[in-house]
């Protein structure tokens, strides 16, 4: 539907067609609500179009390219390997189109009325929608807001999308840059910096804080440091940027409190994201919390009892899987279901080399909450599958309460950590203990066996590690 054909009434209005928005629309439709979804850009939002999916497609291609050298050392010799960035871009776009097309088909099948336009609150039960067909208004009974987030600006740096890029630009380059400076050492900067290093670029990552991936366990940081060194990635920490200047055919990244600058073909700003909240929220009676996000209760309801907020604009990590979960809670609550957000652990994943995945409490956090804790670790190098696939770097670390053995945190760095962390999340959610995990038979030879092994370490009876007595 175009804006000029807007209905003036909506039973349930969803603002935003990203992971949170389209999931909320689908769940509400399942519960019998008549749903209208307004999206200003493309269905699928940042995640499917310019975030999670295209970045992982590029990261996977870079991993395959980088693995060729290791395969040659093991007997699979390849020669004359080249990169065709036009085909790489086609592959990335194909992944995006397949998934966004699938979501559009789901919305059609659920009879969700999709409106293309930019929605802004005009009152407590009304939005103004501006699109190519003009401007219209929709009055709603209930509304779920999932407007997402936008890249955070770096003061003093102007992104020109030519030599000074944002994270989206990095996903669709027409060529492989000879050198690249990534400004920001969070998960976005680490992922994309890793990808281009594996493709062959000379990469420098600059972070203002004293360490990369703030909040990660020390073991994870040490493993990533070794990996970056092997990839030739230079890491500069405790380094604030004072400016980025284009000089001829390259850029100069100036560091504050330093006479030196980092020169590269391209620079990319990846310093995080900020919630997309405008003045219309106040018009609708939606209050913000001290962090600047929307205040919500356990049902994701805002201070306007007919409006719910989910995803990046709600408190918590800006992650698509958090938005998926909150979307179902909000849709069910808005439809009269006894649904509430009671998630114990939200996993975080960094698709670096090797991968990083975390869920629950860190060791430091757990010690503050429980007092005595147990940190049990099992290294990849002692796992049969990891050795067989030549991925011996990394470890599985379990944090548990000492008195009960209850698992409260899982931290993984190593191959396939993104898939392994699901078991850790389930263990935390179910209140499983080290004993529960140790007595659960896992298939051999697999990486999942490291959960059993790590639990056994915590219980003092490891099978495949020599423990000093």
Image: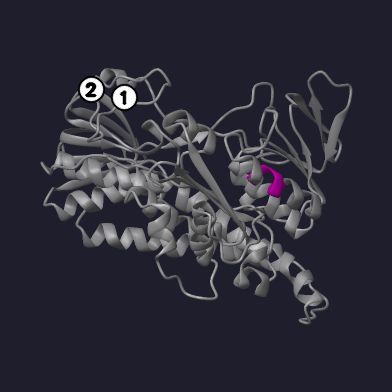
Q: Position of residue 41 (x, y in %)?
A: 42, 44
Residue appearing at x 76%, y 50% in the figure:
226
Chain part drawn in magenta? 220-224
Task: Tell me if residue 61 comes above or below residue 300 in the rendering.
Answer: below
Q: Is residue 1 visible?
A: no
Task: Judge left or right: residue 132 versus residue 194.
Answer: left
Residue 218: which quarter of the image?
top right
- Decide whether residue 221 is among the magenta residues: yes
Q: Position of residue 401 (x, y in %)?
A: 43, 41
Task: Give the residue at mark 2.
Answer: 303
The one nearer the camera, 297 or 245, is 297
Task: Give the residue at mark 1.
Answer: 295
Magenta segment, prevailing SS (helix, strand or loop): helix
Task: Judge left or right: residue 86 versus residue 37.
Answer: right
Task: Tell me if residue 464 comes above or below residue 296 in the rendering.
Answer: below
Residue appearing at x 42%, y 30% in the figure:
369
């Amino acid at each position: 539907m175009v804006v000029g054909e807007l209905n003036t009434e909506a039973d349930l209005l969803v603002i935003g067609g990203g992971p949170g928005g389209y999931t909320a629309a689908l769940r509400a439709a399942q519960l019998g609500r008549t749903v209208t979804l307004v999206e200003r850009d493309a269905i699928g939002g940042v995640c499917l179009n310019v975030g999670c999916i295209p970045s992982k497609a590029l990261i996977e291609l870079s991993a395959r390219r980088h693995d060729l050298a290791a395969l040659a050392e093991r007997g699979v010799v390849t020669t004359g390997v080249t990169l065709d960035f036009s085909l790489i871009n086609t592959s990335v776009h194909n992944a995006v189109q397949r998934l966004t097309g699938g979501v559009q088909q789901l919305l059609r099948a659920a009879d969700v009325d999709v409106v293309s336009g930019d929605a802004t609150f005009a009152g407590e039960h009304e939005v103004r929608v501006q699109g190519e067909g003009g401007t219209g208004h929709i009055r709603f009974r209930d509304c779920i807001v999932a407007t997402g987030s936008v890249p955070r600006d770096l003061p003093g740096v102007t992104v020109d999308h030519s030599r000074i890029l944002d994270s989206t630009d990095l996903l669709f380059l027409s060529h492989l840059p000879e050198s690249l400076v990534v400004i920001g050492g969070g998960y976005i900067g680490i992922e994309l910096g890793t990808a281009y290093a594996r493709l062959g670029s000379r990469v420098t990552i600059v972070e203002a804080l004293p360490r990369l991936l703030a909040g990660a366990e020390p073991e994870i940081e040490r493993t990533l440091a070794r990996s970056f060194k092997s990839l030739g990635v230079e890491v500069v920490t405790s380094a604030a940027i004072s400016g980025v200047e284009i000089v001829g055919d390259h850029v100069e990244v100036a560091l504050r409190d330093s006479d030196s600058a980092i020169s590269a073909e391209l620079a990319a700003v990846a310093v995080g994201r900020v919630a997309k909240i405008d003045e219309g929220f106040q018009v609708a009676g939606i209050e913000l919390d001290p962090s600047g996000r929307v205040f919500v209760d356990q049902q994701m309801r805002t201070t306007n009892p007919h409006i719910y907020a989910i995803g990046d604009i709600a408190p918590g990590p800006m992650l698509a899987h958090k938005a998926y979960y909150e979307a179902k809670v909000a849709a069910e609550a808005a439809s009269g279901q006894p649904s509430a957000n009671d998630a114990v652990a939200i996993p975080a994943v960094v698709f670096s080399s090797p991968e990083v995945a975390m869920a629950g409490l860190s060791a430091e956090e757990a010690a503050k909450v429980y007092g005595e804790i147990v940190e049990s670790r099992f290294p990849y190098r002692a796992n049969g599958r990891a050795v067989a696939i030549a991925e011996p770097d990394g470890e599985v670390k379990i944090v548990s309460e000492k008195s009960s053995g209850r698992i409260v945190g899982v931290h993984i760095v190593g191959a396939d950590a993104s898939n392994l962390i699901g078991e850790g999340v389930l263990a935390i959610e179910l209140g499983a203990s080290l004993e529960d995990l140790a007595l659960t038979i896992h298939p051999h030879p697999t990486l999942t066996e490291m959960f059993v092994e790590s639990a056994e370490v915590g219980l003092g009876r490891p099978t495949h590690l020599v423990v000093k007595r």
